[in-house]
């Protein structure tokens, strides 16, 4: 079940998220295919420049993200895989916390993290994934079994360390609580997907938490980090 963008405005101030999305995406304008008025929006043009500067320029990408994630991998002593994707507006990677292989089945515990390129936001979450290898077809079939939404159990240590490193490098950034990031904005379409009514996470980060990809099985605090968004008294 998808929840629409909303929050308890008496306690929290999430308006900066909406303002950022409105700046870069023409909410309510149909994207379509090819070159329509959606692509003429000043925010979309600016977003394209930002993505190209940060991820398509290899020197910038290595200096601003790859070197940073290597430091994290060295500190944790775990393998890091990059997942920065096409036109998605974020840097992203994951840490392989644990990996087990039984015959043609691989089970991995992955701690994913991303930093938005269009606002002072980051996300962290754990995934339990299984990969079935089909040697005859030369294919692999993967599925996400569980999402861990906060520092919990075997993900706790790595989650807290990654968050600490992100805060050191990006001191003005705030975490997007998992449950809030999964809410949708009516009429929001992103440049790199055909989906309609996209979520906060798709607009700020990437599509990896799309409902069609992740299981409804979740554990941990879905609103971890919400205290960062409390209104000042």
Image (spheres, rainbow, N blue to C red):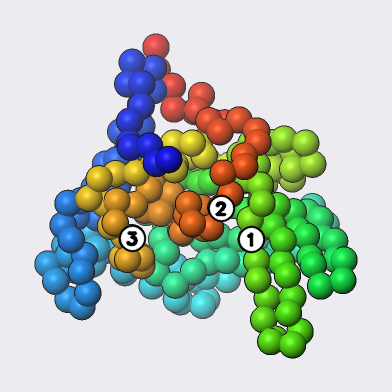
The N terminus is located in which quarter? Answer: top left
Q: Earlier in the sequence, mark 3 or mark 1?
A: 1
**Residue position marked by numbered label 3 in the rendering:** 195
Residue displayed at 46% across by 58% down: 206
Q: Earlier in the sequence, mark 3 or mark 2?
A: 3
Q: Residues within 10 Å of mark 2 (few under 14, many from 20)?
A: some
Q: Secondary structure at mark 2?
A: loop
Residue positioned most to the front: 136
Q: CA distance from mark 3 to mark 1?
A: 20 Å
- Whether residue 16 sits left or right of residue 85 in the image: it is left
Between discs 1 and 2, the one toward the N terminus: 1
How far apart, in angstroms, are the residues tagged by discs 1 and 2?
Answer: 8 Å
In percent of width and height, residue 194 lies at 32, 66
Task: Rate crowding at label 1 as few (under 14), some (14 to 19) or many (20 or more) other CA atoms within 10 Å.
Answer: some
Residue at left offset 36%, top offset 65%: 193
> Most extreme residue toward the right, as rendered?
102
Q: Which residue is mark 1?
A: 143
Residue 38 in view here: yes
Residue bearing the label numbered 2: 214
CA gap between label 3 and label 2 equals 16 Å
């Amino acid at each position: 079940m998808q929840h629409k963008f909303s929050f308890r405005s008496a306690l929290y101030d999430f308006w900066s998220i909406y303002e950022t999305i409105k700046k870069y995406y023409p909410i309510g304008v149909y994207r379509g295919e090819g070159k329509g008025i959606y692509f003429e929006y000043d925010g979309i043009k600016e977003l394209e420049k930002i993505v190209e500067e940060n991820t398509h320029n290899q020197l910038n990408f290595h200096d601003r993200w790859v070197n940073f994630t290597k430091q994290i991998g060295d500190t944790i002593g775990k393998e890091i895989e990059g997942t920065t994707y096409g036109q998605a507006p974020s840097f992203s990677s994951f840490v392989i916390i644990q990996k087990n292989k039984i015959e043609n089945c691989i089970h991995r515990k992955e701690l994913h993290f991303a930093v938005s390129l269009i606002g002072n936001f980051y996300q962290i979450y754990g995934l339990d994934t299984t990969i079935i290898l089909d040697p005859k077809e030369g294919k692999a079939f993967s599925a996400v079994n569980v999402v861990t939404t906060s520092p919990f159990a075997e993900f706790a240590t790595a989650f807290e360390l990654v968050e600490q490193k992100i805060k050191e490098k990006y001191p003005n950034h705030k975490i997007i609580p998992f449950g809030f990031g999964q809410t949708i904005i009516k009429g929001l379409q992103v440049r790199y997907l055909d989906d309609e009514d996209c979520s906060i996470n798709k607009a700020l980060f990437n599509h990896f938490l799309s409902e069609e990809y992740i299981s409804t099985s979740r554990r941990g605090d879905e609103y971890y980090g919400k205290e960062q968004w409390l209104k000042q008294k």
